[in-house]
Amino acid sequence: MKTGVMPVGHLSATQMRSVLLAATAPPPLRNARPWRFQCTPDAVELYADSLTTDTDSRHRERLLDCGAALLNLRLAIKAQNSHADTRLFPTADRPDLLAVVRPNGYETIAPHDRELVAAIADRQSNRRPFTAAVVPDAVQRQLRRAAEVERAWLATITDDQVPQLRDIMHRTETPPATPGPGGGADLDIEPGRLVVVIGSLHDTAVGRLQAGQALQRVLLTATAAGLSATLSTQAMAIPATRRDLRRLLGGGLWPQIMLRLGHGTAVPSVAQPELEDVVISDAHPFGR
C-alpha cells in the first residue's frame, strides 16, 4: 500500500513532510510540476512524467525542472543533519525513475548549504527590469562554483560575445518554448549585463538532470546573495540556434539554459501545491 508521506530511513514522518515541502517548491521553468515523489521505508524515489513522448526541447526542460526538485530534496535532507545518498537513473528499464535518495547516516549541514535551504522558499523567476548595479566578481565566482559542484558548467557571456548572442536570439522565430516565468528571449542582452549559460559536458538524460541540479544551486546561490534571475530556453528550443550558441561558447559545452542575473524588484510568491498531490499514494497514483 502506498501511504504517501511516511518515515524514511531514520527520518520521521514529520521530518519527511518538511523535506518534501522544500522539494516541491516552484520549479524554475514551468508552473506545472512534471515529477512525483514516492516514499519507501529506506528511500525517496523521484519520477518524471511523459519523458518518452516529449520532444527534445520539452524533454530537456522537464529534466531541468526535475533536477531542480532533486537538488531541493538533497539539501532538505541535509538540513535534517542526514547524508543524502543519491543515485541517478538506478534502473535501466525504468527511464521515468530519475533518482533514488537515501537518508543514510548523519552529516552536519555546511553553513552555505543551510543558506541555500533558507533560500528555497524565496527563489522566484523575475521578468521585471533589473537595475544597472553590477554583480560583484566574488558573487560571480560563487555562481560558477555552484554549477561545478553539480558536475555542470556556467559560462559567462562576455561583452564581445553580446552582438553574436543577439543575432542568435533574433533568429529564434518560434514562440518561447516554455510558457510562464521561465520562457522567452527578453534577457536585456546588453554589455555590462550578467548573462550566463548553464551547460553539461554530455547532452544526455543524466547530463540534463545534472544541469537541472546545477541550475537550482546557481539560482539558490543567487537568491542568497540578493540577486534576481530571468530564465530563457528559447535559443535551446531550435537545434540550429542551439548549435550556434554552443559554438559561441567554444564548442565543448552543451547549453541547457540561459539566465540573466542582477538586482531586481520583488515579485509575488507562487502558491505551493498540496503535498499529497505530488507524493505517490493510493489516493494519488502516478502513471507508469
Image (spheres, rainbow, N blue to C red):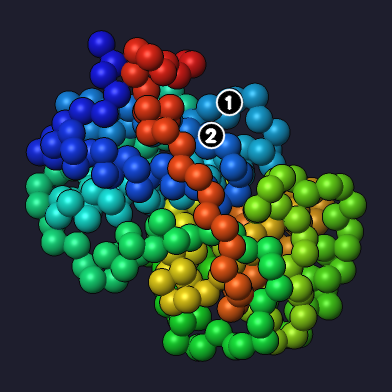
Residue for point 25% across, 11% down: 1
Q: Is residue 277 above or below residue 263?
A: above
Q: Residues within 10 Å of mark 2 (few under 14, many from 20)?
A: some
N-term-proximal mark, 2 vs 1? 2
Residue 44 lies, in percent from the top left, at 28, 34
Task: From the viewer's perspective, tell me whether residue 247 is left or right of residue 38.
Answer: right
Tell me the SS state at disc 2.
loop
| Residue 284 image-quadrant placement | top left
Asked whether disc 2 touches disc 1, contact meaning CB atoms under 8 Å apart, the reply is yes
- Mark 2–mark 1 distance (CA, rounded to whole Å): 8 Å
Rendering coords of residue 156 (x, y %): 61, 76
Q: The residue under label 2 is which amino acid type?
A: Pro
Question: What's under tag 1, amino acid-wise?
Answer: Ser
Q: Which mark is residue 34?
A: 2
Q: Is 158 or 233 nearer to us in this picture?
A: 233
- Horizontal relation, residue 8 to residue 202: left or right: left
